[in-house]
Amino acid sequence: KNQVEQSPQSLIILEGKNCTLQCNYTVSPFSNLRWYKQDTGRGPVSLTIMTFSENTKSNGRYTATLDADTKQSSLHITASQLSDSASYICVVSAHGTYKYIFGTGTRLKVLA
Amino acid sequence: AAGVIQSPRHLIKEKRETATLKCYPIPRHDTVYWYQQGPGQDPQFLISFYEKMQSDKGSIPDRFSAQQFSDYHSELNMSSLELGDSALYFCASSLQGTKNYGYTFGSGTRLTVV
């Protein structure tokens, strides 16, 4: 069964600190993996898109890694800001389909 | 740059009424996806269309139907609304076959059923 699991479920950090969010998937055959940031009540905003051959991709203070062998991805946020408070969703798509499997999400809260 | 446009932004309906949500994809995008996100829940895939044909179907209730028109915009029709249909409905669009699998969400339509 295609599944995407994220950890932790929720996370609280102080402004300026770094954090790492995890995403494990069993989707096969793998096509690509996306990290989205979703503010409450808003549509998800794409942070990174990674294909099988990509190990690391950065977008400003966000750095995503992908290990296709262990089927794990991480999203590292550097020097967190209050505006980083949001849900971070990992989405994996299977090759040859139009379906996207959403992860359970990590709810991040950055405190001043 | 043009984004995925959804209308209306907010909608309030009574139980057993019908609602129609619209989605205008990014120009030249040929695929549209509909998602439902209940309060405190992750988005759930409902249905998708590629080149005006249904390409995949998720957890869409039988009371709902959708279609994609010749201009690639899509409409989600919801009938016999129930309180549990209150949710944020997202539309996303993409262009199949592109290297980056461009996939962009709209800002959503918040449906409240009272």
Image: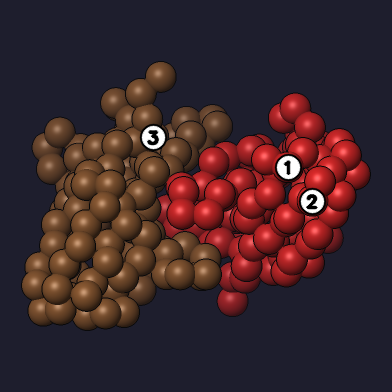
Task: Report the residue at 13% width, 43% height from top.
Answer: B69
Viewer-side residue, A83 vs B57: A83
- Looking at the rendering, in which quadrant would you find the C terminus of chain B? bottom left
Q: Which mark is residue A111?
A: 2
Task: Please give left or right for residue B21 compared with residue A82 in the image.
Answer: left
> Residue tagged by mark 3?
B95
Instruction: Kindly state the secondary structure of the residue where label 3 is placed.
Output: loop
Quadrant of the image occupied by residue A16: top right
The hue used for chain A is red
Viewer-side residue, A37 vs A54: A37
Identity of the residue furthest to the right in this view: A17
> Residue tagged by mark 1?
A82
Distance, label 2 to label 1, CA atoms, is 6 Å
The hue used for chain B is brown
How far across and down, in percent of the image, does residue B40 sit?
A: 52, 69
Task: Please give left or right for residue B107 compared with residue A4 in the image.
Answer: left
Instruction: Kindly state the secondary structure of the residue where label 2 is placed.
Output: strand
Identity of the residue furthest to the left in this view: B17
Residue kind at label 3, given as amino acid type: Leu
Mark 3 touches mark 2? (CB < 8 Å): no
Q: In the displayed structure, would residue B77 be above or below residue B14?
A: above
Task: Please give left or right for residue B32 compared with residue A15 in the image.
Answer: left
Mark toward the start of the polypeptide (2 vs 1): 1
Quadrant of the image occupied by residue A12: bottom right
Task: Please give left or right for residue B29 compared with residue A3 in the image.
Answer: left
Callout in the foreground (3, 2): 2
Task: Report the residue at 69% width, 61% height from top.
Answer: A106
Q: In the displayed structure, would residue A10 be above or below residue A85?
A: below
